[in-house]
Image (spheres, grey):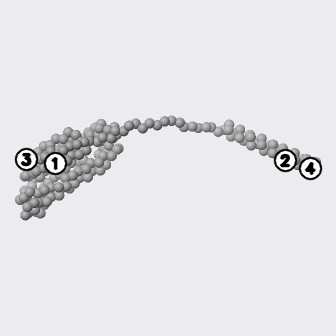
């Protein structure tokens, strides 16, 4: 009978263990929840278009100029001739954000005027001109254009580029002076 009892004990133990596992499985299933996430996404079309428009030029004094060539993304090939103190040339233009994304001026690279005299007194003439020339890029409200300036979608800002021989100067060059380094690059980034 001990053998029979031991065998019965093993069978009962296995049966109890199976019932316990089944019971735990049922209890786990009853206490668990299924969570689900579903959805869709859509990427709307983006239109990125920053451009120049509406170029106007004006002079003061005896200054002369060649109006720049304007395209959507550049003003180029302008020439300015200044003769005496107070002479200036001003180019006014709009920078439009015709896209549907706000923009920010991420990089502004403005050249520094470099003067070179063409006559026998070239170095001295170059110094006179470079010490008396003012070269600016501002907004029409007279604020300086700087990195971080915003340009909201569908809007524009009017910019003014000016080159002037200072009116309070008492010095003039003896010969012609060529001024280079008047390039400006504006790189707008998505805001």
> What secondary structure is found at the residue carrying circle 3?
loop
Mark 3 to mark 2 CA distance (whole Å): 116 Å
Mark 2 or mark 4, earlier in chain: 4
Answer whether labels 2 and 1 touch (C-beta < 8 Å): no
According to the image, label 4 marks what residue?
2
Residue 150: x %, y % from top left: 30, 43
Q: CA distance from mark 4 to mark 1?
A: 114 Å
Q: Residue 183 at what x, y percent from top left? A: 21, 52
What crowding class fits label 4: few (fewer than 14 Cα within 10 Å), some (14-19), or many (20 or more)? few
Q: Quadrant of residue 176?
A: bottom left
Q: Residues within 10 Å of mark 2 (few under 14, many from 20)?
A: few
Q: Earlier in the sequence, mark 3 or mark 2?
A: 2
Q: Secondary structure at mark 1?
A: loop
Q: Residue at x 34, y 44 (%)?
A: 190
Can residue 175 be seen at all in this image of the molecule?
yes
Does residue 152 appear in the picture of this structure?
Answer: no
Image check: 150 left or right of 78? right
Using the numbered discs, state the Cα–Cα distance from disc 2 to disc 4 in whole angstroms: 12 Å
The residue pinned by badge 1 equals: 78
Mark number displayed over residue 61: 3
Work out how far the residue at label 3 is from the one at label 1, CA to CA, in angstroms. 18 Å
Q: Secondary structure at mark 4?
A: helix
Could you say which is closer to the camera, residue 50 or residue 23? 50
Where residue 143 sits: x, y (%)? 23, 46
Vertical side of 99 occupied by 9: above or below: below
Left of 69 or right of it: where is 27?
Answer: right
Label drawn at residue 129: none
Q: Nearer the viewer, mark 4 or mark 1?
A: 1
Check contact, mark 3 vs mark 1: CB within 8 A.
Answer: no
Name the residue beneath numbered marker 2: 10
């Amino acid at each position: 009978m001990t053998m029979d009892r031991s065998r019965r004990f093993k069978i009962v133990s296995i049966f109890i263990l199976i019932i316990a596992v089944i019971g735990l499985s049922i209890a786990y299933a009853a206490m668990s929840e299924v969570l689900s996430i579903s959805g869709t996404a859509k990427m709307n079309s983006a239109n990125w278009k920053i451009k120049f428009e509406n170029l106007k030029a004006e002079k003061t004094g005896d200054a002369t100029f060649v109006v720049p060539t304007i395209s959507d993304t550049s003003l180029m090939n302008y020439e300015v001739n200044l003769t005496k103190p107070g002479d200036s040339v001003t180019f006014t233009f709009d920078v439009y954000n015709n896209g549907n994304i706000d923009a920010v001026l991420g990089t502004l690279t403005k050249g520094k005027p470099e003067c070179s005299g063409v006559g026998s007194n070239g170095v001295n003439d170059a110094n006179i001109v470079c010490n008396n020339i003012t070269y600016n890029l501002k907004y029409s409200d007279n604020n300086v254009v700087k990195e971080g300036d915003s340009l909201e979608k569908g809007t524009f800002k009017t910019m003014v580029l000016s080159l002037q021989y200072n009116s309070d100067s008492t010095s003039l060059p003896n010969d012609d002076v060529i001024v280079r380094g008047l390039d400006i690059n504006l790189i707008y980034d998505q805001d």
